Image (cartoon, rainbow, N blue to C red):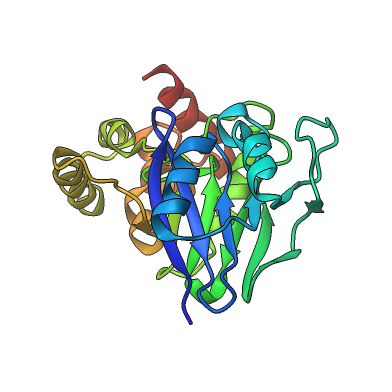
Amino acid sequence: MAAEIRTFTCLTDNFGYLVHDPATKATASIDAPEAAPIITALEREGWTLTDILITHHHGDHVGGAVELTRKYGCRVVAPRDKSGKIANVDLRIANGDIVQVGNLLARVLETPGHTLEHVAYVFDSEKAVFAGDTLFSIGCGRVFEGTYPMMWDSLLKLRALPDDFRLYCGHEYTASNVKFALTIEPDNPALQARAAEVAKLRGENKPTIPALLGEEKQANVFLRADDPSVAAKLHMKGADAASVFGELRERKNKS
């Protein structure tokens, strides 16, 4: 039986996600931005939380974990965190590990850059990747703890996933990402199509996520830093991809 995935809003612009295995009734929350919306979503579905799969240590991704574990006694899965910023973890995971939620299997990808111990959870059988704050639709996360080459390598790991995978990211940033991307590639037809789609969805107060990864590869300029046309737009012809990516991220920081 296929997993059931529910998407809802937490805090101001965080996404909350529940991944449910109908066969075993196991249910995972991807991150825990705040407890109340997650509890509401669980009660609406009649599900019980068995796992929290954390992508990174920022407060808007772990803030509800303590309350949820007290209420449900659920398992907390998180990256190996040398700094100890993620507390009360039951299972520490690293690149290539497999996390089981009922009969569902999530493959761990280490995607450092936004934070040093960031991970993504890849449900291959469901063709879904939960990328946290590494990759957004038409954008990527700020590089707070890592380096631009590190973040570029992490984006390449996600870009290598098949085109028919759906991207589930940490925040509803797509409209602002589109606005920036159009300053770099105004004539990109895939970006223009996504811009129109996003405007329609947000106009109807609907989420822009999930996004199809194949479309992201064509429209998301941060995934295209190794395309010579992007380097040319930045007057960086011949520069290495990590440098082009760094320039893109610097410009986005200031936009």
x, y percent for residue 48: 56, 58
**Image: 16 above or below 168:** above
Q: Quadrant of the C terminus?
A: top left
Farthest top residue in view: 254
- Of residue 96 and residue 8, the one placed in the foreground of this image is 8
- Residue 149 appearing in the image: no
- Residue 63 appearing in the image: yes
x, y percent for residue 42: 47, 53
Q: Quadrant of residue 234?
A: top left
State how many labels appear.
Answer: 0
- Of residue 242 and residue 253, the one placed in the foreground of this image is 253
Q: Quadrant of residue 185?
A: top left
- Of residue 170 and residue 247, the one placed in the foreground of this image is 170
x, y percent for residue 72: 65, 49
Q: Quadrant of residue 175?
A: top left
Residue drawn at point x = 79 percent, y = 35 percent? 87
Q: Is residue 66 left or right of residue 158?
A: right
Residue drawn at point x = 59 percent, y = 35 percent? 64
**Image: 153 above or below 127:** above
x, y percent for residue 153: 63, 48
Residue drawn at point x = 59 percent, y = 75 percent? 24
- Of residue 236 and residue 156, the one placed in the foreground of this image is 156
**Image: 138 above or below 216:** above
Q: Is residue 20 left or right of residue 196?
A: right
Q: Is residue 91 left or right of residue 37?
A: right
